[in-house]
């Protein structure tokens, strides 16, 4: 089972191409100024069988891959490795955001998930290093790692972007990395 905060079946600002985005629930890092503090609690929010989520993702037409964010994806590494393996086998790419540094992903489960990622954005969000003009990052200390040859620096858009999604129930989700102009 995965503990999920929310999903968006199609986003163009959370990595290259159109992506299915999964926000996991639970993060022990608690970075001050975090964009998603509602995802910190490890209490069950929406528990989803990995197989069911994989089927939903694979049934979503026209996506290039998935993006794992949170919360902290590497705190559910074993389950997400199963999900990542399924979507990779179907030809989709995997991108993940983590507050951990690359060298902190040292457990077997975390290494397994890392090996399935094409792109990893790593590093704790630091309010003092916050920048609204970095592509795929919230603070300048965070690093984008291209882990396979599928993507490179050329895959990154030239500027930051954000999206606003309005659900059928009226819920609003703002995602991506808004520029300084948008924030104003």
Image (spheres, rainbow, N blue to C red):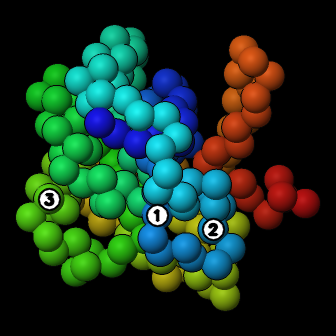
Q: Nearer the viewer, residue 38 or 115?
A: 38
Q: Is residue 33 left or right of residue 180?
A: left
Q: Which residue is mark 2?
A: 34
Secondary structure state at the residue bearing disc 1: loop
Residue 143: horizontal and vertical position, in percent? 40, 73
Q: CA distance from mark 3 to mark 2?
A: 25 Å
Q: Which residue is mark 1?
A: 27
- Contact flag, marks 1 and 2 (Cβ < 8 Å): yes
Residue 170: horizontal and vertical position, in percent? 80, 22
| Crowdedness near tag 3: few (<14), some (14–19) or many (≥20) residues, C-alpha within 10 Å | some
Q: Which dot marks residue 67?
A: none
**Of label 3 and label 2, which has the lower sequence position?**
2
Residue 131: horizontal and vertical position, in percent? 66, 74
Q: Which residue is mark 3?
A: 109
Q: Name, please, the residue furthest toward the front.
A: 43
| Crowdedness near tag 2: few (<14), some (14–19) or many (≥20) residues, C-alpha within 10 Å | some
């Amino acid at each position: 089972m995965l503990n999920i905060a929310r999903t968006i079946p199609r986003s163009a600002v959370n990595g290259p191409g159109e992506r299915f985005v999964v926000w996991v629930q639970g993060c022990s890092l608690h970075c001050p100024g975090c964009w998603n503090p509602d995802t910190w609690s490890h209490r069950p929010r929406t528990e989803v069988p990995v197989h069911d989520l994989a089927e939903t993702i694979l049934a979503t037409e026209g996506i290039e891959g998935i993006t794992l964010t949170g919360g902290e994806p590497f705190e559910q590494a074993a389950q997400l490795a199963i999900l990542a393996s399924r979507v990779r086998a179907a030809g989709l790419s995997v991108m993940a955001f983590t507050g951990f540094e690359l060298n902190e992903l040292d457990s077997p489960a975390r290494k397994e998930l890392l090996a399935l990622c094409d792109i990893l954005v790593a590093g704790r969000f630091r309010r003092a290093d916050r920048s609204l003009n970095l592509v795929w990052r919230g603070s300048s200390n965070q690093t984008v790692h291209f882990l396979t040859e599928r993507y490179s620096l050329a895959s990154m858009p030239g500027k930051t972007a954000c999206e606003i999604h309005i659900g059928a129930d009226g819920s609003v989700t703002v995602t991506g990395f808004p520029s300084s102009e948008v924030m104003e």
